[in-house]
Amino acid sequence: MLNKDDVEKVAGLARLKLTDDEIAEMTKKLGQVIDYVAMLDEVDVSGVEPMAHVADVANVFREDAVRESLPREDALANAPKSDGKYFLVPQILENT
Amino acid sequence: MSITELTAGKIQDGLQSGSFSAVEVTQSFLDAITAHDGQVGSFLTVSGDSALEQAAAVDSKRQSGEPLGALAGVPVALKDNICTLGTKTTCASRMLENFVPPYDAHIVSRLRDADAVLIGKTNLDEYAMGSSTENSSLGETKNPWDLKRAPGGSSGGSAASVAARLTPLSVGSDTGGSIRQPASFCGVVGMKPTYGRVSRYGLVAFASSLDQIGPFATDVHGTASLLEVLAGHDERDSTSVDRPVPEYTKSLEQPLVGLSIGVVKEHFAEGLDAEVASTIHSAIDVYRSLGAEIVDVSLPHSKYGIAVYYLIACSEASSNLARYDGAHYGRRASEFENMVDMYATSRAEGFGDEVKRRIMLGVYALSEGYSDQYYVKALQVRRLIRNDFDEAFKKVDVVVGPTCPGPAFRIGELVDDPLQMYLADVYTISANLAGLPGISIPAGFNSAGLPIGLQLMAAPFVEEKLLRAARMVESQTDFHTKAPTL
């Protein structure tokens, strides 16, 4: 059974700031989905290889060749904050 | 007959014979959008000026005798989770409300090379997460057959725009039924190709092992002609498969001799609307009358499809959507305390409720102590679902059944009940889990005049046969010629 503490922990891992109302709502609705998926408990999967992917391709390599990349100006064009050279973010290290 | 009533194929014929110009075609559809999209709400962006420029370029190429691409002068609308250089790509999310991609998706390059006219970007459930397009944060799309009803989703705008004859062709993406289910609700043809058939480069990722781009049209021929352009290898998507693309339109009119059709008994179980059931049985009778062999098949693990899907799709989504951090592109909150708070606040402001729910479910299913119980278990049952199909396709060429358990539901009807909404995808979801191609075609109308879709599925890379089988029943019926009155 999913409780409020679980939901708060998951929200932290997911980097989602949720309001108290959202936590309550999420506890209820996620709980319903978790209860629903419990039906998988009845399936015998012993010896079944997990199928992460259906594509019939593996180890797709290309030549390690130098080629044109996205121009810096284009890469920064959608940045919320930039100085024209870099993405700007809040300071993460203390001044020493 | 006005241009907007024509199929994509008839528009191509008319352009070739000089009955009308590409500019006239594009202007006709732009006029229809102006007249009707206020009601339907299928577009988030209408690219009128650039569409007319592209059309004029096609006309001048034709006049000067230059070679023309396969879709020269035909308008195509794109779901707004497909990146378009210089044109906003929002995913119907406040997170990407002002995002202008610096590159074209592979399929957009293919469409430009084919001289198609890119007429606009269509509405969707935010990040393609939903079955009704009600999860869009940027607009409301209505079903053109009944404006009180949902168009389905998540490619609701792409389906509704074709149904309302606002574009002859459109492109969507299908992760659990997001092309086929809205095609069924809106009475048009929609197809999910085999996983790997169409490059996902430039498709904003939701669940990478399930997502696939595919075509919408009013008829099977239009669907086939658009798929010919979309399909093909692209080294920028390492899951894109390098194998030749058949000329689907060339063989379309040849009926399949000795066709064997599998009827999935689990798709006619409890929960299926009675009028949908009788409509689908009529379509099966058409196949029988054409000499097809009808065989009962069983997909015993299909009942676990939705549970498996939500665990896998949400797990992949929680990873894919981790990139929205408020640092590189997309929304950044205006107020926050530190770097981590910037992430959490930007994401809280940018994502809608359903996107948050799915990220949360995915993080939970992958979290320490739970991943074997949820994620790995789901991957094991996924293999059993695929094995069921492999067994079925040893016996039959295609399987048929209803696309959806019922016709379009009312807007607001399921919005507070995510689990019931998920069940709308019960028949479509397994094709994504197994990586198979599937198509929904109009099969009739219920007593309220709402469209009902027939779904056909085939083994991987058997699109050519799937399209021909779809055309066989379409050629005996006229449901695809009906358009809603707006």
Image (cartoon, coloured by chain):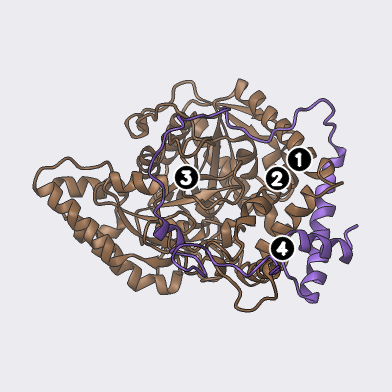
Chain colours: A purple, B brown
Q: Quadrant of residue A18?
A: bottom right
* Marks 2,1: beta carbons within 8 A: yes
**Residue tagged by mark 3?**
B201
Local packing at callout 2 (Cα closer than 10 Å; few below 14, some 14-19, many 20+) is many
Q: Say which element carries label 3.
A: loop
Mark 3 to mark 4 CA distance (whole Å):
26 Å
Residue B378, numbered label: 1
Mark toward the start of the polypeptide (2 vs 1): 2
Dot 3: chain letter: B
* Marks 3,4: beta carbons within 8 A: no
Mark 2 to mark 1 CA distance (whole Å):
7 Å
Residue B420, visible in the rendered structure: no
Which three-letter amino acid code belongs to the residue tagged 3? Tyr
Dot 1: chain letter: B
Which of the image's four quarters has the C terminus of chain A? bottom right
Q: Nearer the viewer, residue B266 or A88?
A: A88
Mark 1 to mark 3 CA distance (whole Å):
26 Å
**Residue farthest to the front, as pictured:** A96
* Marks 2,4: beta carbons within 8 A: no
Residue plotted at (18% across, 54% down):
B57
